[in-house]
Image (cartoon, rainbow, N blue to C red):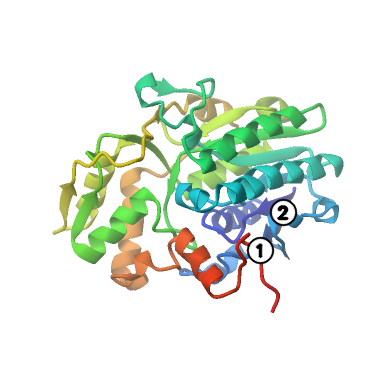
Amino acid sequence: MRLLVTGNQGFIGPVLVAMAKARGHAVTGLDVGYFADCIARPEAEAWPDRQVLRDMRDVTPADLEGVDAVVHLAGLSNDPIGELNPRLTYDINLDATLNLARLAKTAGVGRFVFASSCSIYGAAGGAGMLDETAPLEPVSAYAVSKARSEEGLLALADESFSPVLMRNATAYGLGSRPRFDLVVNNLAGWAYATGKVRVMSDGTPWRPLTHIEDISLAALCAAEAPRAAVHGEAFNVGRSDANYQVRDIAEAVRAAFPGSTLEITGETGGDPRSYRVRFDKALAGLPGFAPRWTLEAGVEEVARWIRDGGLDADDFRSRRFVRLTQLQHAMAAGDLDDQLRRVAR
């Protein structure tokens, strides 16, 4: 299969590209290059067969020629970045996504796998376990952009164009461009740097989690699946035991760093998100999908890399590992303008 993977130079992209190539697919990567210099681990096996350096807002019909399926990962990638400029979040995460899908449909691309997010369930923590039919309650520009993209993609579905909505749980793991601005990795960074696993809340909010290799596997299974199994479907992506309260995540991190202590501040903060989701649909109905990573194994993977010298004590807060900081650095250096467009030199 000929795949176009957008966002292939991000956190999940290199992992997915390497997995796709191992499964025999020909891969074109499309990425603007915001995080091209954030490599912290070897990634020779993660280079696509062809690389297109392009802003998502400038995709052309030629970029879709000969493509069988799109796996769309690209976008401003979390809530803090989304709040940097909500209009830009909608331009890149929503408008550019739907433009890409329309171009793909016109070009005859049959499958469009969209990296959505469980964050679209938002503040539904009191609603019990949520399946894919649950109402959406997004509480950030990032989550709103994902929910509205899902709606727009489904409106494009027909007998020749099949969007598939992958509602990924919160990611953790390494990859070649690791992130330490996501809860599991961030807590591990603090444990290493300070000896404290500090939870800036009362620890009770619920978060579903999944490893980036399992996210990648699910996306590829969605791209490869028979049309009848995935056409117009949404899938929560994670393990059946993948819902955790933040204090339990913190305890798993503390256990991986002997001598560290756990501190729960009891603050309420301004983040209302708390939600638990069901993963039965993907586990039973997404052909070939069987997640293999547990939280404990993923935390140990991150901790081992840190202990083996992959991370300096203060480096986990640097621009290499924090997406918002990297964008702010590029803007301050004059490499990006205030619309996050590349500045010609």
* Residue with the most extreme bottom position: 345
Nearer to us in this view, 68 or 11: 11
Report, in whole angstroms, how far the alpha carbon at label 1 lies from the one at label 2: 9 Å
- Can residue 20 be seen here? The reply is yes
Exactly how many numbered labels are in the figure? 2
Asked whether 235 or 298 is in front, the reply is 235
**Vertical arrangement, residue 158 with respect to residue 311, above or below:** above
Q: Which residue is mark 1?
A: 341
Residue in view at x 45 percent, y 64 percent: 325
> Which amino acid does the dot numbered 1 rest on?
Arg
Q: Tag 1's secondary structure? A: loop
Q: Are marks 1 and 2 in contact (CB under 8 Å)?
A: yes
Q: In terms of sequence position, does the residue under pointer 1 or pointer 2 come before the other?
A: 2
Image quadrant of residue 247?
top left
Q: Position of residue 170 (x, y in %)?
A: 43, 43
Q: Is residue 269 left or right of residue 158?
A: left
In the image: residue 83, left or right of residue 180: right
Name which residue type carries label 2: Arg
Q: Point out residue 114 in the picture as x, y percentages from the top left corner.
A: 63, 40
Q: Identify the residue at image location x=22%, y=52%.
A: 198
How packed mark 1 is, by other alpha carbons closer than 10 Å (few <14, some 14-19, many 20 or more), is some
Residue that numbered label 2 is attached to: 57
In the picture, the quarter occupied by the C terminus is bottom right
**What element does badge 2 sit on?**
helix
Q: Quadrant of residue 51?
A: bottom right
Percent across and percent down for residue 1 are 75, 48
Q: Compared with residue 272, is residue 181 higher up or lower down, i.e. above or below?
A: below
Q: Residue at x 85, y 55 (%)?
A: 62
- Residue plotted at (44% across, 26% down): 278
Q: Say which mark, if any, is on residue 271.
A: none
Percent of width and height locating residue 64: 81, 51
From this viewpoint, is residue 73 visible?
Answer: no
